């Protein structure tokens, strides 16, 4: 092998010597011709770049009055904490937000500026898709195009559960919309190109491949079915485009796995088909109106498949079917395994949940099931949830972080707090799981519709009338 290498080196040298007398003009022409034939993404990018925008956000967010306590320790202080009970040295201190020394004190507001990216998906109407976390708590949004023009924008709709938001540019003309690909056709190994505005540097392009499909688990409460890519995605890329080599949108860049804050080649994008389903609902309703199937389930793994004698290794195992739900009406049973939806293979319960989570009320789907080892097909029409649940951030950014639903207990109607995420605005003002919102600013509230109507007026101060067990109280936010 060493001898062969030496021979090849000598051959290359001899060719170079033989070409020495050749005219420098001819050599230059040859080099120019060769460079023109080199493969390049430039022609494709020239067409796509006008569709990708930079987003500048100004906003105001609620910040905790936690007395400088690190976030990981804030959960140990509050009304129910033993550290804040009578006789405790911490009682009445700033650390006990719910104690006598700070009871009723609202979180303070803090102004901020943020940067992100977005993609024009409808040139005629000026629609731009981005991440919800880019524009959350925004009071002013400005979008800058690749040609230097900038426009103010308003939020048409947003969905914290998928981290998608839809903006509309004001008085914008001569826009270029991106073509949207069918993300269901993606394969691991397909080439990808990420475009965005990392760290506010301006338009930046990176490339990679599809590393994996159907990723989930970043936030178990959200609807996740991510494309994983090794194309470099950094802060400021959020909301930017992930495209294929045809210049078509395959995903919206959303998150990175970065233990030290920098890119390590693990980025995540929301598939374009999810984006299309969500934004079409935002255009029609101003929000996402999810249909409900009415099942509980888990991932099918080899151990569960063996225990249940199921001849499959992947799928969504149904552990419970809710009474009177769409699933129950369609004849779906506990113990069934969902292996396909509308002809597309289902590999996990998380992936199936994400697929259902983008479909509106009234959507008709065909499910392929395994029941007692035999294939079964059922037709299901997704229904409006009998216990309609919304994210409080969709109603009012100042109380973001709580799941709310209609409540009617012992004839008392209101809005129930089903869950509260730690560290969110809802947690900081004192909302707790199980609370019933009975009124806002001295106006009675009997359901989500009435709550939405009041919060749509964007009051500067909120006084929430809360029923907590046998106790009535007010929570204030200003």
Image (spheres, rainbow, N blue to C red):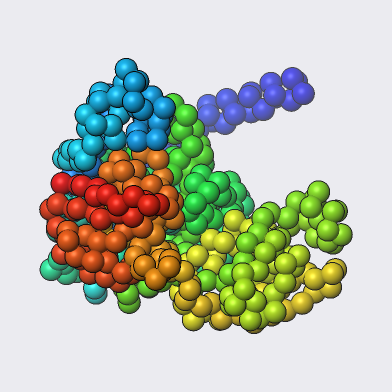
What residue sits 26% from the left and 35% below the top? 64
> Looking at the image, is 255 positioned above or below residue 295?
above
What residue sits 32% from the left and 17% below the top? 89
Question: Where is residue 397 drawn, in percent x and y?
Answer: 26, 53
In the image: residue 179, left or right of residue 197: right
Question: Where is residue 431 drawn, in percent x and y?
Answer: 34, 47
Q: Is residue 53 visible?
A: no
Query: In the displayed image of the protein, which residue is found farthest to the top?
Result: 89
What residue sits 64% from the left and 28% below the top? 11
> Looking at the image, is 54 positioned above or below residue 17?
below
Q: 158 or 187, which lies in front?
A: 158
What residue sits 56% from the left and 81% below the top? 381
Q: How many marks?
A: 0
Question: Where is residue 450 drawn, in percent x and y?
Answer: 27, 70
Q: 339 or 233, which lies in front?
A: 339
Q: 323 or 439, which lies in front?
A: 439
In the image: residue 75, left or right of residue 362: left
């Amino acid at each position: 092998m060493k001898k062969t290498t030496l021979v090849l080196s000598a051959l290359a040298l001899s060719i170079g010597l033989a070409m020495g007398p050749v005219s420098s003009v001819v050599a230059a022409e040859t080099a120019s011709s060769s460079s023109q034939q080199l493969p390049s993404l430039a022609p494709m990018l020239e067409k796509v770049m006008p569709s990708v925008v930079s987003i500048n956000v100004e906003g105001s967010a609620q910040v905790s009055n936690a007395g400088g306590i690190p976030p990981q320790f804030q959960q140990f202080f509050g009304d129910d904490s033993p550290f804040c009970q009578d006789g405790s040295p911490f009682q009445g201190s700033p650390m006990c937000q719910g104690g006598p020394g700070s009871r009723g004190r609202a979180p303070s507001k803090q102004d901020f500026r943020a940067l992100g990216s977005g993609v024009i998906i409808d040139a005629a109407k000026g629609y731009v898709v981005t991440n919800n976390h880019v524009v959350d708590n925004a009071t002013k949004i400005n979008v800058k195009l690749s040609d230097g023009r900038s426009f103010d924008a308003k939020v048409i709709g947003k969905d914290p559960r998928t981290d998608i938001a839809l903006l509309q540019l004001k008085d914008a003309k001569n826009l270029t919309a991106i073509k949207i690909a069918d993300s269901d056709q993606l394969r691991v190994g397909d080439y990808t190109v990420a475009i965005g505005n990392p760290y506010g540097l301006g338009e930046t392009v990176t490339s990679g491949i599809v590393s994996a499909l159907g990723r989930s688990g970043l936030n178990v409460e959200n609807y996740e079915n991510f494309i994983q890519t090794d194309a470099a995605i950094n802060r400021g890329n959020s909301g930017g485009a992930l495209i294929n080599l045809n210049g078509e949108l395959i995903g919206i860049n959303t998150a990175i796995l970065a233990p030290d804050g920098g890119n390590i080649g693990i980025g995540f994008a929301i598939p374009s088909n999810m984006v299309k389903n969500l934004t079409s609902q935002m255009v029609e309703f101003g929000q996402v109106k999810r249909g409900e199937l009415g099942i509980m389930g888990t991932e099918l793994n080899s151990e569960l498949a063996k225990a249940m004698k199921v001849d499959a290794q992947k799928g969504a195992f149904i552990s419970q079917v809710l009474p009177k739900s769409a699933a129950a009406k369609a004849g779906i049973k506990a113990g069934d395994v969902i292996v396909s939806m509308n002809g597309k293979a289902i590999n996990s319960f998380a992936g199936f949940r994400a697929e259902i989570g983008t479909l509106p009320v009234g959507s008709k789907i065909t499910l392929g099931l395994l029941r007692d080892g035999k294939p079964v097909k059922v037709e299901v029409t997704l229904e409006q949830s009998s216990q309609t649940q919304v994210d409080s951030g969709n109603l009012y950014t100042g109380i973001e972080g709580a799941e709310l639903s209609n409540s009617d207990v012992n004839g008392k109607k209101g809005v129930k707090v089903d869950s509260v995420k730690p560290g969110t605005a809802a947690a900081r003002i004192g909302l707790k799981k199980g609370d019933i919102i009975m009124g806002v600013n001295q106006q009675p509230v009997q359901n989500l519709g009435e709550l939405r109507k009041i919060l749509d007026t964007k009051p500067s101060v909120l006084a929430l009338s809360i029923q907590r067990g046998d106790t009535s109280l007010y929570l204030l936010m200003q």
